[in-house]
Amino acid sequence: MSQHGKQPSEEVDDRQLRLAREAGDAYRAAVEYMIEEVAHTGDTREVGDYVVGFAQEEAEGLYELVGEGEFAWREPDDENAHVEVVVADADDGRMVPGADVSLRISDRDGEAVESATLPLLWHPGLYHYGANVRLPGDGTYSLEIRVEPPEFHRHDEENGDRYGEPVEVTFENVDVKTGED
């Protein structure tokens, strides 16, 4: 549970809070499915107002919008891993959009081998932040994820003072499998 759970207020009633929790439960189920059934590996941790997690897969192609209504499919260049990061509200579990998310990957000796800014990615089953990255190969790595607060305005005098501090979480001894999907 977050350091301050949401309460009914002039802006939100019990039903709206229940519906938000139900949406968060569905998002959490999609995250768990991605980590446990789809990805090679993954994990989540609660930190501050957030739950931050990752899933790691082989590098994969992505559509890019290149003009109004025009898309181009982009296969990985020399990238060999895909890292997905979820940022969710620790209280209700809904995805937190608009955050600046960055990733630093280090080898067993603590040497940084890759870093990336992770944009928001649309996925048919799970909105997430993520990117294809280039790693030296299969192995054990540490993933340091930093989440900068989103700049969007927050409704609600009682509940809106959340997501104001940057957070960092490190997942150590992560077994990474590289390749292309």
Image: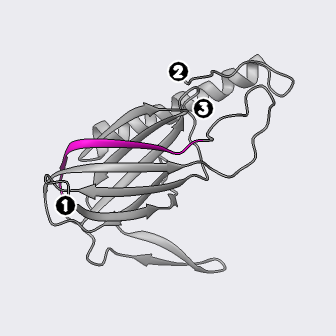
Nearest the viewer among 140 and 74 is: 140
- Residue at 14%, 63% in the rendered image: 137
The percent coordinates of residue 62 (x first, y second) are 42, 68
- Residue at 33%, 47% in the rendered image: 55
If you read the primary sequence from the N terminus, does the residue marked by circle 1 or circle 2 appear first?
A: 2
The percent coordinates of residue 119 (x first, y second) are 50, 61
What range is drawn magenta here? 165-177
Is residue 181 visible to the viewer in this orientation of the structure?
Answer: no
- Residue at 53%, 27% in the rendered image: 25
Residue 99 is one of the magenta-drawn residues: no
The percent coordinates of residue 132 (x first, y second) are 34, 65
- Residue position for label 2: 1
- Residue at 44%, 50% in the rendered image: 146
Q: Nearer the viewer, mark 3 or mark 1?
A: 1
* Left or right, residue 163 beside residue 168: right
Viewport quadrant of the C terminus: bottom left
Q: Is 64 drawn above or below residue 151 in the view shown?
A: below
- Residue position for label 1: 178
